[in-house]
Image (cartoon, rainbow, N blue to C red):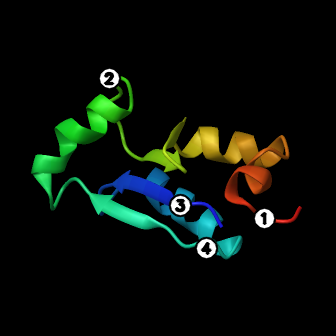
Amino acid sequence: MAEVVLYTTGTCPYCIRAKMLLDKKGVGFSEIRVDQEQARYPEMVQKAGGLTSVPQIFIDGRHVGGCDDLYELDFDGELDPLLGLGG
């Protein structure tokens, strides 16, 4: 199974949607709450190529974007292989 890391905030509806999709697929993930760990925010921006919105999602170190990008990968049938799911 792939390593999934999400940079989120507690009140972001897009963060909640992204986590719901991963939960539905049974995929575990690490969540970094940049509203609680503000020192991690610059790390997120740097890793995401300057993007400042949340969520920023990484699968096995690869930046896949935000919530809409995650759902687009799923719609296109590309998410399950990235996650290491048999699909």
Mark 1 lies on residue = 85
Q: Which mark is residue 50?
A: 2
Q: Dot 1: within a 10 Å radius of its alpha carbon, few (fewer than 14), some, or many (20 or more) residues? A: few
Which residue is located at x 34 percent, y 54 percent? 8
Q: Dot 3: within a 10 Å radius of its alpha carbon, few (fewer than 14), some, or many (20 or more) residues? A: some
Ranked by sequence position, the earlier of labels 2 and 1 is 2
Asked whether the residues under the numbered discs 4 and 3 touch, taking CB atoms below 8 Å apart as contact, a structural biologist would say: no
Residue 52 can be seen in this image: no
| Residue 38 x, y percent position in the rendering | 12, 51
Residue 44 can be seen in this image: yes
The amino acid type of the residue labelled 2 equals Gly
Q: Dot 4: within a 10 Å radius of its alpha carbon, few (fewer than 14), some, or many (20 or more) residues? A: few
Q: Quadrant of the N terminus?
A: bottom right
| Residue 53 x, y percent position in the rendering | 35, 36
Ranked by sequence position, the earlier of labels 2 and 4 is 4
Q: Which mark is residue 23?
A: 4
